[in-house]
Image (cartoon, grey):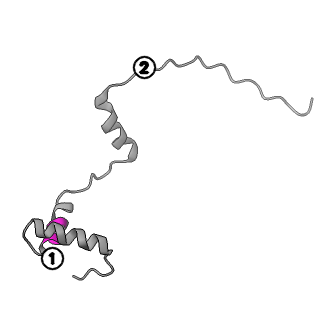
Amino acid sequence: MTIQDIDEQLETRLRRQAARHGRSMEDEARDILRAALSTDPAAGKNLADSIRGRIEPLGGIELELHKREAIRDPSGFDE
């Protein structure tokens, strides 16, 4: 596999990280890909479920709901 047109700064960061871990850039890239793809994405979750999952453990508040009025008859134009 060949990856072309990598941003120069990204390549530099990859090279430095690989050096810190004592391995080649190719080995470092493999490890990064392995880690990124080792978990399955949350299937079937939508945005509302994701937000609820983060907020729900924090507790909630009770909001005062105002009493709704009956729907008024629309004014007619033929009067």
Q: Quadrant of residue 60?
A: top left
Q: Disc 1 marks which amino acid?
A: Glu
From what the image shows, is residue 27 above or below residue 40?
Answer: below
Residue appearing at x 18%, y 65% in the figure:
32
According to the picture, the residue beneath numbered tag 2 turns out to be: 62
Q: Amino acid at mark 2?
A: Glu
- The residue located at (12%, 73%) in the rendering is 27
| Crowd around label 1: few <14 · some 14–19 · many ≥20 (10 Å) | few
Q: Is residue 38 magenta?
A: no
Quarter-wise, where is residue 22 in the image? bottom left
Q: Position of residue 53 (x, y in %)?
A: 31, 38
Q: Which mark is residue 26?
A: 1
Question: Mark 2: few, some, or many residues within 10 Å (few <14, many ≥20)?
Answer: few
Q: Is residue 2 above or below residue 41?
A: below
First in residue order: circle 1 vs circle 2: 1
Residue 19 left/right relative to 73: left
Residue at 8% over, 72% down: 23
The N terminus lies in which quarter of the figure?
bottom left
Tell me: 71 left or right of 54: right
For the C terminus, give its image quadrant.
top right
Residue farthest along the left direction in this orientation: 22
Nearest to the observer: residue 29 or residue 63: 29
**Residue 40 location, x and y as percent?**
22, 57
Give the residues drawn in magenta, as a range. Answer: 28-32
